[in-house]
Amino acid sequence: MNTSERNINYSYMMNQWGNINYKKVRNFDEWFMGDFDDSYYFQDWDKILRYHAGAGFKGIEIMIFQVPTMLNLFGSMKNFKEFANERGIEKISGMFSHHIGSEDKRNHERIFALERQAIDALADCDGINLIIQPCGQYYGTGPLSAEGLQNAADCMNEVGRMAADKGLVASIHNEFWCAVNKYDHNKFIDLCDPRYVFYCLDTAQVSIMGIDILEFYKEYHERVQYFHVKDTTKKAASDAERFQAGAEQADDGTRWFWEPGGGFVDFPGLWKLMKQYGHKGWVGIESDGTPNPLATMLLTKNYIDTVLDPIYY
Amino acid sequence: MKTALSFELVNMYSSLADNMYLNYKWYWENLTDWTAATGFDSISLTLVPNQFNVGRGGAPRCTLAINTKYGSAKGYLAFLNDRGIKNVSSFNISAQSVFADMFESGRKFEELYDILFEHADDTSDMLAQLGGSCLNVSPTPAIAALKANLGDDETALAKFADEAIDCINKIGAMTAKKGVRTCITNEFWTLARGNNLDGFFEKLDKANVGYTASTAMLKIAGVDPVAFIEKYLDNMGCVFFNDTAFVDKVGVYATTTPEYAQEGDQQRLYRDLGLGDVDFAAVYKLLKDKGFDGYVVLEPRYTTNVPRAVLRTRTFWTKLTKEA
């Protein structure tokens, strides 16, 4: 089925591949002989894009930290888009960025400078969604004062306007470990300008924060323009777990995020609501923390085909 | 001579399938255990400027991460000692990592050497507390990055090199007061590559600044590592043993991705120790004959399999010293 025949299409976030350093690795023997491992297969955009297209994903999403290397490799994001198109990827649906220090107005110009680069890069590859972590981690920053929360919202509003000027959509992405956290979550959304700032619902991050994503989606479905789909086995983590230093990268290696179907998130329930509200557009898949991106990608595709598509596509 | 294992065997930005786990504290604590289990009692770390995404993780890649996860340098040293590692013998910092950080930090190119000095001040404080002796400093960003900012202008590049030398001299004077020796390095992609180091070194204050050599970096730059190390032996800080089978036929050193060759027959720059064609027997003989008493840092740089490389490194060193 073509992407144009579906209400929703799936895009895969590329963060599990790190910062991809090669455009195309050509010589198998150079990597295999002497080491006899599989490193040849996991280092270049050529093969990684083809894995995603081969598994049936027509879109990808990128991280802001990948942009400098992509520009070094391809010369421009437009060239990267063409390279991806040739390999069966039809859309670069979005880019993830962050507003570290946004609670302090003195940091805003630095953040705007970073986001100008992000917006230019995303627009150059015909992207859609700029997905933004609104603040740094809770540890060392939270809880935010009323002024700090307002400053973070002001920062988001300005970036939302900047994105809209280039035809892009800026969305809040609220991590369970972010300085904007459970107790400020809805308030922060309400402080942001609905004309310019939308919401990317990360099903695992928000669940771990202790928020019922179905109830949230019912209330905020008009603001939710995008999704990050991932599962979790950690329902409503405690404040102590969420507010610890570097909480997302647990010191003992605990895995927070799983492929859909691997945890407790009610995806069928969410898809029924998406159908009810007539959601249309790209839906992002994230596999942060998987020790095997290929296995997770294929399990995810199978879940989409057998569980989600029968509900709504 | 003393030995240390370089933790720059891990490529933080590689696209290997378990890349995410490289940011977890447990990964590095496992690596520390493997290091001790293979008989090494010292490590060398590469540190980048403090920034959010590195600082929130558990990799000992910036002082913020170490302070956050272990409380302080003292806390990290206590952990290392408990696991059988007696010290961190050297830190490696670079003008390239300062430059790369500017995309997200928003700092200006003109501020590069101010930031590098601050970075050196911060890291040398920690290194002194970790029992280290050498702060290895790579003096310039990559040549391609410089040309993108300065133009392909020899006069501008020479002026920039002088700024680098001034900064290294200042860093040397500053770290000497802490009991840490600053050593310039010459990666094959910087302005100080290969024999270009001579022009840098003659302007450096030898009382405070030494040189740390890397065998693969010299070889890729087209320089004989043995002869070059011998020339600088009186000023040598550490000697990094890293291996390569790469021959730069396409000028990769001047490209935007110098450690990742996009063109040419060869794309892989580094090999685990003993799998390339550096003549380590000759380098080792030179160091032994001359009574080198500094650190030989064993670095299977950017290996494709970290635990395997740790084991291979022990095998390599045992064989090398036995045959010698």
Image: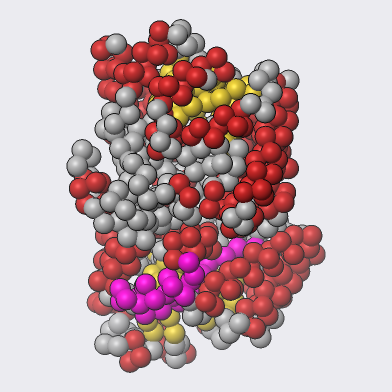
Q: Quadrant of residue A131?
A: bottom right
Near-viewer residue (B280 or B133): B280
Q: Position of residue A287 (x, y in %)?
A: 39, 61
Task: Work out whether A294 lies above or below B12.
Answer: below
Residue at image location 42% in from the left, 43% down from the top = B11
Judge whether residue A97 is colored magenta.
yes
Residue at image location 48% in from the left, 55% down from the top = B256
Q: Position of residue B34 (x, y in %)?
A: 36, 28
Near-viewer residue (B207 or A277): B207
Task: Work out whether A82 lies above or below B220.
Answer: below
Q: Is residue A39 left or right of residue A21?
A: left
Residue at image location 66% in from the left, 20% down from the top = B206
Q: Position of residue A115 (x, y in %)?
A: 63, 68
Residue A269 at least partly seen: no
Residue B185 at least partly seen: yes
Q: Quadrant of residue B246?
A: top left
Near-viewer residue (B199 or A122): B199
Q: Position of residue A285 (x, y in %)?
A: 40, 69
Q: Which residues are magenta?
A: A75-99
